């Protein structure tokens, strides 16, 4: 599937990837898909993630989405009209499906899961793999304060709207000699996700000449 992204939509693929990965979390992760022999669901989830983001973020019409994704308008319509709760119910009752039924993910089911994933990402709940690689990156770059900070804020609901939501969690962590609780008070809010939190802290350190 080839999607041509215009300059004004340069963040499209980044958001779609986050929604797609969150959708995988919702259906139980890649290991669960492998156990149920349903890895063939992935293309359907990817198309649904693209369709939902194009509609919600860029207000694309069904025809425009169909053209961008190379699928029929009817398929787009099924994705966008999908019932998230019904889709979630089917996923939660996978054990009751026959092996043949598990191999097939109907378009509207993928659409429902993508809608849930989109909402969660917009509310600040990132895919597990996203947070995992944030942690790995901080370790690889030997940034101990970042690694400790991510451990302390694990489970925090993003977006964070004020420093009050972080101050108690980060107490005891030092960032370049500064108490973490004092640093987070100096940041601009809201903060959408852990990656943005680290980015804003680095900008603050640079401003203080501590980078």
Image: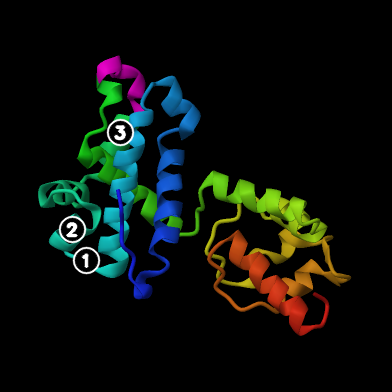
- Quadrant occupied by the C terminus: bottom right
The crowding category of the residue bearing disc 3, from other C-alpha atoms within 10 Å (few below 14, some 14 to 19, many at least 20), is few
Query: Do the residues under discs 1 and 3 have CB atoms within 8 angstroms?
Result: no
- The residue labelled by disc 1 is 60
Whole-percent x, y for residue 24 in the image: 43, 40
Query: Do the residues under discs 2 and 1 have CB atoms within 8 angstroms?
Result: no
Q: Is residue 143 above or below residue 91?
A: below
User: Is residue 98 at least partly visible in the picture?
Assistant: no
Number of numbered callouts drawn: 3
The furthest residue to the right: 177
Query: Distance between the Cα atoms at labels 2 and 1?
Result: 11 Å
The secondary element bearing badge 2 is classed as: helix
The crowding category of the residue bearing disc 2, from other C-alpha atoms within 10 Å (few below 14, some 14 to 19, many at least 20), is few
Q: Nearer the viewer, mark 1 or mark 3?
A: 1
Q: Earlier in the sequence, mark 2 or mark 1?
A: 1
Image quadrant where residue 103 sits: top left
- Tell me the residue at 76%/79% (across/down): 206
* 130 with respect to 77 (left or right): right
Q: Earlier in the sequence, mark 1 or mark 3?
A: 1
Q: Earlier in the sequence, mark 2 or mark 3?
A: 2
| Magenta span contains residue 96 | yes
| Magenta span contains residue 132 | no
- The residue labelled by disc 3 is 89
Whole-percent x, y for residue 196 in the image: 59, 67
Q: Nearer the viewer, mark 2 or mark 3?
A: 2
- The residue labelled by disc 2 is 67
- Tell me the residue at 41%/69% (across/down): 10
The span picked out in magenta is 92-100
- Tell me the residue at 28%/19% (across/down): 97
The furthest residue to the left: 74
């Amino acid at each position: 599937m080839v999607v041509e992204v215009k300059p004004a939509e340069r963040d499209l693929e980044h958001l779609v990837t986050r929604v797609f990965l969150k959708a995988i979390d919702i259906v139980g992760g890649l290991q669960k898909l492998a156990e149920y022999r349903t890895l063939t669901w992935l293309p359907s989830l990817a198309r649904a993630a693209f369709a939902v983001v194009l509609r919600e973020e860029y207000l694309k019409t069904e025809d425009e989405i169909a053209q961008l994704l190379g699928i029929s308008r009817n398929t787009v319509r099924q994705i966008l009209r999908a019932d998230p709760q019904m889709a979630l119910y089917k996923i939660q009752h996978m054990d009751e499906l026959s092996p043949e039924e598990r191999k097939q993910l109907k378009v509207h089911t993928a659409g429902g899961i993508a809608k849930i994933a989109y909402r969660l990402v917009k509310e600040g709940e990132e895919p597990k793999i996203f947070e995992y690689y944030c942690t790995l990156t901080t370790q690889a770059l030997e940034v101990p304060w970042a690694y400790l900070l991510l451990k302390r804020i694990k489970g925090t609901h993003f977006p964070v709207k004020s420093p009050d939501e972080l101050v108690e969690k980060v107490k005891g962590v030092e960032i370049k000699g500064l108490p973490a609780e004092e640093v987070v008070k100096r940041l601009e809010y809201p903060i959408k996700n852990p990656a943005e939190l680290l980015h804003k802290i680095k900008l603050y350190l640079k401003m203080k000449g501590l980078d």
